Amino acid sequence: MAAFLEASGEKVVEVCRPKRPAQRGGRKTDALDAIRAAREALTSEHPILPRQRGEREALRVLPTTRRSAVSATTAAINHLKVLIVSAPDDLRSEIRSMSSKAQISHCANPRERPSQNLEHRMTIPALRSTAQRIQTLRAEAKTLEEEITALVNDVRPDLMEQIGVGAISAAQVLVSWSHPGRFRSEAAFATFAGTAPIPASSGLTNRHRLNQWRPSTQPSAPHHHPRPGPRRPRHPRLHRPPHLRGQVPT
């Protein structure tokens, strides 16, 4: 409905769910909800505008689908670990000493052993199915990341040139920043990204720290940042052994 009204030239404003008055028993009808929503929109200091379509929607659906594939991959890996731990002794001793990558490759193409007992024969198909699912999901996530990279380069190629900004982070920045009315200032966007300073003083100490709060959709894993940039130089006293730190060097 919002898209239809916007296409017709009408001004559309989104409102959150209006609060029902407790003293009236929380009455609910379509007419009352419409009146409450209209009052909420009229009294709102910062009205919420509908999300844009087109490039923004394309940048939103691709990372969301990739995030779903990554979450499913993690769940499949955890399930594979459980299957390996509960596998028969001879099969577990053969696989458990391998690395995670080798375990997935080995379980995806296991050797057939028809002479083994029923438990062993049924565990092998379970391992094969789970490992092949992991490989499929990883390939899907990689393909989606390549599509995200190509789309970001088409929309804002200069954003990928910034230090510490990868394809996933750039897509999330474009999706979040392009929502009209979501961020009223750069400070609000810094708070959303987890880079805003907040007071952390105590007594005579006056200092600040970074606000590490970030929504669950905000990417924060190191592999999202292919160019992390230079590290901040450490204080000279921290280069000394721990038992000498804090002392004035002689």
Image (tube, helix red, strand yellow):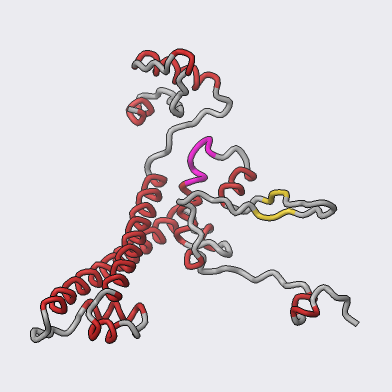
Look at the picture and state if 5 lies above or below 216.
above
Residue in the picture at 43% in, 27% down: 17
Task: Give the percent coordinates (x, y) of residue 149.
Answer: 41, 61
Q: Is most of the magenta stretch helix, strand or loop?
A: loop
Residue in the picture at 34% in, 15% down: 29
Q: Quadrant of residue 71?
A: bottom left
Q: Where's the C terminus, which quadrant?
A: bottom right
Task: Give the percent coordinates (x, y) of residue 121.
Answer: 13, 78
Seen from this angle, which residue lies furthest left?
114
Task: Give the percent coordinates (x, y) of residue 229.
Answer: 61, 69
The answer to whether residue 173 is magenta is no
Look at the picture and state if 188 lies above or below 8.
below
Instruction: Judge left or right: residue 38 versus residue 236.
Output: left
- Toward the viewer: 25 or 213? 25
Look at the picture and state if 232 lies above or below 186.
below
Q: Quadrant of residue 73?
A: bottom left
Q: How many marks?
A: 0
- Toward the viewer: 196 or 121? 121
Residue in the picture at 65% in, 50% down: 196
Q: Where's the N terminus, which quadrant?
A: top left
Instruction: Judge left or right: residue 102 versus residue 120.
Output: right
Task: Give the percent coordinates (x, y) of residue 194.
Answer: 59, 52
- Toward the viewer: 62 or 96? 96
- Region of the chain picked out in magenta, as a range: 176-182
Q: Quadrant of residue 130?
A: bottom left
- Toward the viewer: 223 or 171? 223
Residue in the picture at 20% in, 80% down: 109
